[in-house]
Amino acid sequence: MSFLSPWSLLMFLPLGAIITLLYLLKLKRKEQVISSVFLWREAVADIQANAPFQKLRKNLLLILQLGALFLLTAALARPFVRAQGIGEHKVIVILDCSASMQSTDTRPSRFEMARRRALDIAERMGPGDKMLVIAAGSKARVVSGFSSDKKALAYAIRKLKPTDAPCNMRRALLLASSLAAGRSARPPRIVVLSDGGFPDVTDLPMCEMSFDYIKIGSRCDNVGIVGLDARKTLSGEQQVFISLKNFSSRERRFSLEIYLDDQLIDVSEQVLRPRQTKQQILTSLRTAKGRLTVKLDLNDDLAADNSGTLYLTGRRDISVLVVSKGNIFLQNALSLDPRTQLTLTKECPSDLEKRGFDLVVFDCVRPLATLPPGGYLLINTSFPGAPAKRTTVVASPKIIDSERHHPVTAHVDFSPVRIARATLLKPKLWAQTLAETSSGPLIVAGEKDGRRFVQLGFDLLESDFPLHVGFPIFMTNCLEWLAPSESVGDCSATHTGEPAYINVPPSLDELTVVDPDETKRKIKIRQTPVAYEYTDRTGVYRVLGRNFYREFACNLVSTTESDTRPRSSIRISKTKWVSAAHFGSIRTNRELYGSAVLLALALLVFEWYAYHRRL
Amino acid sequence: MQQEAQTTTTPTEAQAESELLTPDFLRKLEQLSLAVKRVFPGRLRGERRSTKRGASVEFADYRNYVTGDDFRRIDWNVYARLEKLFLKLFVEEEELHVYLLVDVSKSMTFGTPPKLIYAKRIAAALAYIGLANLDRVGAAALAEGKALAFPPRRGKRAAFLVFDYLRSLQDCAVADLSNALRDFSLQTAQPGLAIVISDFFDQGWERGILALLSRRFEVVLLHILDENEVSPPYVGDLLLVDSETLERREVTITQSLLRAYEARFAAFCGEVESFCNRYGCGYVRITNRTPFEDLVLSYLRHRGMVK
């Protein structure tokens, strides 16, 4: 133990001398005449005979007061010990929770090792130190605010779990920087516990921060799926694309297994040289429908990238009823899509609900008063439940504006369209104008009570719109929006950490999503498609609703995460931070004046007690 | 100053001292008599059994007739049967000598009421009881050179003389209980009942009692104490001054010291009592807080001192 201000100890001598001098002065006792002192004499003798350390006891108060004085002067001298510590008043620990941290090259895993390091830092905190913990997965999350409570910090750190998502370190560093900024003149230290499995953060605005990067992990022995996708050709046939990469420094042999709805449909032997990437396109699944799972049968450090799942939708027919006096352009445009099954009629049937059409087109024919839930295209007609009222008839209106971001009017060019006569529309509150003339809206879309509408204010035959390129695009868009696909992503799957969009029927107001680890989450539907953000696990997510069941999958197809080589340095802004072997290997001065003052206070309390109890 | 404060008497105490006993109380005392275990020879006839043979109605013994004996005492019935002359003897009833010995040391002036006044009133009451029963009552202050200042007298008329004497007693700065008792025992010709009223805060008092016993006195110790001596109310750093010896003692009175004092005090009382038991003395411990009438009429009767 040393002292920062040892000369203060000299104050003990004069002050101690004063206290001793006060004790040496004769205590003025109150005189009390009593009948006889002989019994008192004998009682005092008895006590002195029975009490050990009698001489010491006589001066107990003096000893206690001198002890308290010494401790107080020692506190003024600022004693300290050299101890292992974090050496800073505040530290922010960023714990990488990404998929690569599940690598088992360091036992039991990189994440466990990082967790131990974080606990170690928390344990070594001094009395004035504070620590904040940020979990860095696909999102950055503060799991414990600045706290000096070691137990609370340890509890928060122990509760953390690794995810299957890529690491968004930039967001975590931004969060740390914003939390550190302006807190004190001495900025907190930011400690990054990671394997470096994230892109360099080159655009961090606050680059004057000081970082400690602690590398977790020792080697890279991993083969992973770095690409998995499916697409449809124009003829509606499906192709599945698989990309594999060997990130290790040795040749790996393994089996590539392909399952369709848990049935093994293909196995192939794969040989990948070090650092080799291999791509495959499966063309045999032309019209297959169901859950396609790709698995690598091998034992490597990271298991999260050894499987992937896709949903193949196959070919889906769309039943369309066209209620029209006859419109060849409309029939041809709808027939372009091979999925479409057209039914033509001149009058609206009364049993619409029973027949269950995906889309009903009313071409200049007034619909029934009430329509069942579904998609409706109203051409130059209206009814009370329509999204817009027909107002005034205008001649030769010119469409001057259209909603390019709406799925119905996306990629449709209305500028060359000529219209002889049209009826302007007045959209209701729940409807949205998609195309507008200088006089008023002409195309309106809206959704209410499970019914989706697109309403046109002009007859197609009184315009040259069917002759333009935009017409088949417009009709295809109408088909997609008014009769939406049944599965999520339509052939593709979501990446972990990214939101999944779930198309649900308009009649649903609540969903339950069951994660791959069987965690259930209830979701209120406010708009469709529903964005589901808790996609940190790879695997199959089940979506349950009233008379509704869907599945979607999340895959880790990330070269950055699958490349589990631990980086010995990371680049943040323009500075390269090299990994330190251990955090807190510095020895710091731990001041003890607080303990000395507390001890002095305890001595004074005991002295007060001893004085009043006449011990 | 404090010493003076302790010895100054309050108006009530002064009245009690001037009267000692009220007429009503004196009438109650006439019903009582002093109890003695032993039989003492007296000088004049009285109401106490004597070691002598005399002319009471209580038969004691026979003895052979010798020339010169009174014919009236010959038991003629025995002569008729045995044809021998026997004299019938009767127990003589004589007076008893009662000595009231009051400690007048400085320590007796402490307490509320002062122990000395309390002791005087007890002595007056016992003297009146004795005088009312035709006992010969003497009194003495136990101080050096003052042994038997009031010689034994008999008859109720002497009561007021005893009261005057007791009233006139003053505390004495130098009082050696042991020597005073020894002097008393040597100067007193006729043994009898010696009632010693004291707080016995004097080392060596046992020798004085033994001197009395050696002169065949029947001794009763009235141990009078003050409540403040039983449970001292003092606390803190004090300079205790002995009222008699003026010995000064610095003490810091703590709970443990108070406990030690109380233990020592209990041991001291136990020593006095065990001494009395060992030598056949009567022992009565009283405090000055006991109501005086209750003490005489009830407490002393229960303890067998009066009957």
Image: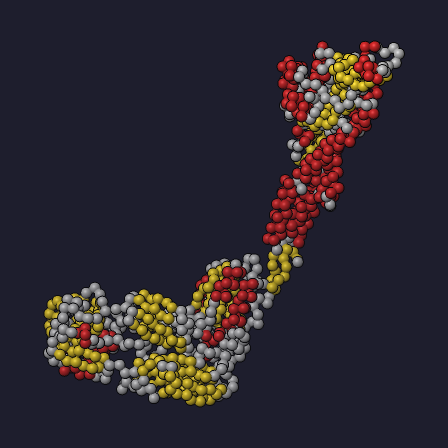
- Residue B177 in view here: yes
Q: Is residue B6 visible?
A: no
Q: Is residue A257 left or right of residue A476?
A: right
Q: Quadrant of the N terminus of chain B?
A: top right
Looking at the image, residue A361 lies above or below residue B85: below
Q: Residue A273: percent from the left, percent from the top?
A: 48, 88
- The residue that appears at 14% across and 68% down in the rendered structure is A369
Residue at the far front in the pictured view: B81
Furthest-right residue in view? B67
**In the image: residue A549, left or right of residue B286:** left
Determine the residue positioned at 84% across, 10% down: B70
Q: Say which quadrant the C terminus of chain B sits in.
A: top right
The spot of residue B125 in percent (x, y) is: 69, 18
Q: Is residue A392 above or below residue A38?
A: below
Image quadrant where residue A87 sits: bottom right
Viewer-closest of B177 and B278 = B278
Q: What's the residue at 18%, 72% (across, down)?
A: A455
Q: Dividing the picture into quarters, in which one does residue B104 lie?
A: top right
- The colouring scheme, among rainbow, by chain, secondary structure or one colour, is secondary structure
A310 in relation to B131, above or below: below
Q: Please state if B30 lies on the left or on the right of B78 as rendered.
A: left
Q: Where on the picture, by quarter, is residue A504?
A: bottom left
Of residues A300 and A480, the one nearer the viewer is A300
Which one is nearer the viewer's eye here, A294 or B147?
A: B147
Could you tell me residue A414's position as x and y percent? 20, 76
Residue in view at x 24 percent, y 82 percent? A339
Horizontal arrangement in the rendering, residue A531 relative to residue B134 (left or right): left
Foreground pick, B115 / B134: B134
Disc tally is 0
Q: Looking at the picture, how far across and down is residue A209, in whole percent? A: 49, 66
